[in-house]
Amino acid sequence: MLKSIVTDGDPVLRKKAVEVASEEFGTEALQTLVQDMSDTLRSTKYGVAIAAPQIGISKRIFVVRGNVLANKDRSDTSDDDVAFINPTLIRRSKKQERFDEGCLSVPHKFGTVVRSEKAVVRAYTASGDEFEMSGEDLLAEIFQHEIDHLEGVLFIDSAQDIYIHEPQAE
């Protein structure tokens, strides 16, 4: 089910999200939440990932679009979205680069953020299986951006050269 994306000013975006409890893994409620996040993400024109706080739910979950992951070396070739539950950033490269970022919860604002160019995340699936995924460039940026959401941090907190871009009518 499509959910509304909350925007800057909503207090849920500034709270540290709570971990998904062990008894929630494998439940229909968790699976439904992940599906709602995926459906909401796919309803956006430019979104590549979404964190649970962005739909008003203070839980440590984010979902990445499958087409972003399909460009990564994966054992499967599906473009299914992937949920990262209770994610932890376990490694980041010392080498950093500047990324141009935007956010579904900060509409029409963009800016430059300095982030590690490589990152590794450890997380759980909705059924409770642990996994790790590494990423570089865009995927590393996504991991760091989404985990920031789970900590109550928005990209505009550290972005430089912030500008407004209003979309053109189609």
Image (cartoon, grey):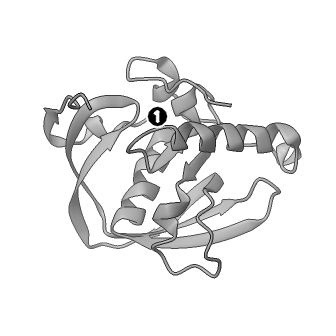
The image shows residue 150 at horizontal and vertical percentages of 52, 41
Q: Quadrant of the N terminus?
A: top right
Q: Quadrant of the C terminus?
A: top left
The image shows residue 113 at horizontal and vertical percentages of 23, 50
Left or right, 86 with respect to 54, comes to right
Left or right, 161 with respect to 91, comes to left
Please say whether residue 24 is visible from this viewpoint. yes
Please say whether residue 19 is visible from this viewpoint. no
Q: Nearer the viewer, residue 50 or 77?
A: 77
Q: State the residue at coordinates (35%, 73%).
A: 93
Give the structural element (helix, strand or loop) at label 1.
loop
The image shows residue 109 at horizontal and vertical percentages of 23, 33
Q: Amino acid at mark 1?
A: Gly
Left or right, 26 with respect to 131, comes to right
Q: State the residue at coordinates (39%, 17%).
A: 9
Crowd band around label 1 with a 10 angstrom C-alpha radius: few (<14), some (14–19), many (20+): some
Task: Classify 142 as above or below 21.
Answer: below
Q: State the residue at coordinates (27%, 36%).
A: 156
Q: Residue furthest left?
A: 161
Which residue carries the number 1 mark?
A: 152
Left or right, 56 with respect to 109, comes to right
Q: State the residue at coordinates (53%, 54%).
A: 64
Question: Which of the 4 image quarters holds residue 8?
Answer: top left
Task: Classify 90 as above or below 52.
Answer: below
Q: Nearer the viewer, residue 82 or 59?
A: 82
The image shows residue 83 at horizontal and vertical percentages of 64, 54
